[in-house]
Amino acid sequence: MLRNIFLKTLRDNRWGILAVGLGLGLVLLVTIMSYPSLFTGSAAERARQSAEFTQLLKSFGALLGEAVPIDTIGGFLTFRSLGFLPVVIGIWAAIVGAGLIRGEEEQGALDVLLTTPHGRPAVFGQKVASLGLGLVVILVLLGLSILAGVAAINDTMSFDRIVATLVNMGLITAFWAAVALLLSQLVATRRTASTLTGGLLFLTYLLDNVVSGLDSLKGLAWVLPFHYYAVNKPLVPGRALEYGAWTVLALATVLLLGVALWMFAWRDVGAVFPLLPARRTATGSGNLALLGSIFTKTLRDLVGPTLGWGLALAALGALLVAVANEAVAPMRDVVQNIPWLGALFGNMATTEGYLSSFMDGVLPLFLAFFAVIQIANWTGDEESGRMELLVSEPVPRLQILLARYAAVVCSLAGILVIQGVTLLGTAALTNTALDAGRVAAFLAGIGVVVLLVLAFGLAVATWLKEPGAAVPITGGIILAMYFLDLLGGSFAWPEAVRNLSIFHLYGRPLAEGLVWGNMAVLAVATLLLAGGSLAGFARRDIAK
């Protein structure tokens, strides 16, 4: 697979493609198979439960978007998975798209590639085509999972509508890959491009859900890319397909790719595309702040991501707290009438319970992927050759890795402090009852989970021959553990099985407080894995 650029790029991303496709396919399969067990009793009772739950969904519009009837498997799947699934696939597309060109520039490989008889448009086109084929593979795996799940429960679903759903998901994912590719022409590093794309992705997803639920702001939704995905819900009976929305997404994606190609064709390799005329600067006048040690240099690199993640997640928290009083009231009766809601989301009849259903359920997963990005940065340093220069300096190897750990801890602490201040501040402004002790426990628990993920990923990276494989391995295990906990509650799996998930051990501290025994297990595991990563880095042959 090294004979041409297309196959080489596909080979480099094969594990990520399979991990995303198979992992999310399993999620869809199990979600579909759980549907028959959710609503029980007579036909009239099932219809009543479905109607009450559909009404309840309107309280979660800020995160789930438009509420749709869930009395069919198509409606339930749309509510349960299809609203958020493009965000997960989009993160993968953002990471890969940002690295198609800029990643190889950082490694120095693009300089060599461009000396071969391949023009820049050909290089760009083959790499984009490879990403497109990878996306098609993911969508095919998701489609097969839907078909298998529907067959397993003896239900039916229109094949045409399944294809339309996959096309809809593919278009929004391709759009975000194009955004990442364009931003990678404007910034100097892959990590900056992927971080900016991820921030825009999550922010526009949240904004679309918010403005679409408010009559006074619905007009603004037309400038948000997720609106053109959300208006199409092919699996919901009676919903017409919006071909115009598909056309808009397709044209926007082509336009972004065209601009990215033009920028790539007209800029210097290793440089960014100059949006403004360059200014002459005195030699040596660059900003050298915080470059005096490995720790401060790493901390400086994390300032932008810290603010970006902190403010984005704080906006989510502020929104949830602001609507908590209004949302909790209609939930009390519905929770009593639908028993499985408690197992799936926890007790949502209190303010802490309502917030916990999202904050405890979603925030640890988001920040676990913050740790995955830090693992990717570490493996990128080694694969690009920067690590060789660093270890050749008179600095102990243990100090190098410990400095990285310390910088990430500081960054994570900053994100969590921003979140905590925002939650408590919004609660005070909106007269929402919120226990400060529970908030502190919630943030501390998340910190332990994220550091465990970081330690695991670095341990894998320092012991593997090819460190880059640690990223999809860690990401795949995170998703598996997350859905093990989620589905374990729905299917009442044994506690011993659910304890295999770090998210189950984390629990719901915002609603129930910390389980200190579980936190001790996670903390010990973090220390052991961190020690394993230090040992692996100490004996590693960096230059192999």
Image (cartoon, rainbow, N blue to C red):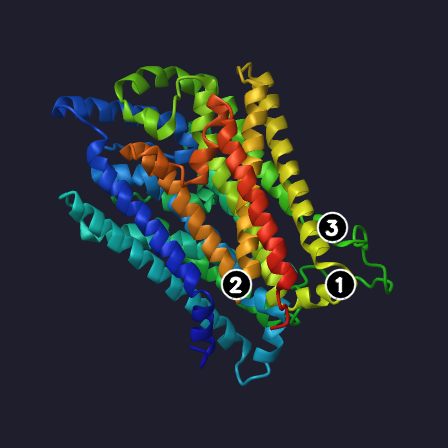
- Please give the residue where the numbered disc 2 appears in the rendered image: 464
Instruction: Write down the residue under mark 3.
Output: 295
- In which quadrant of the rendered image does the C terminus lie? bottom right
- Chain-order first, disc 2 or disc 3: 3
* Residue named by callout 1: 278
Residue 39 shows in the view:
yes
Name which residue type carries label 3.
Answer: Phe
The type of residue carrying mark 2 is Leu
Q: Quadrant of residue 341?
A: top left
Judging from the image, what secondary structure is the residue with disc 3 in? Answer: helix
Q: Is residue 489 above or below residue 118?
A: above
Q: Which one is nearer the viewer's eye here, 91 or 476? A: 476
- Image point (39%, 46%), residue name: 480
Q: Label 2: few (<14), some or many (≥20) within 10 Å?
A: some
Residue 373 screen position, x and y as percent: 56, 52
Q: Quadrant of the N terminus?
A: bottom left
| Left or right of 476 in this view: 539 | right
Q: Position of residue 120 (x, y in %)?
A: 55, 76
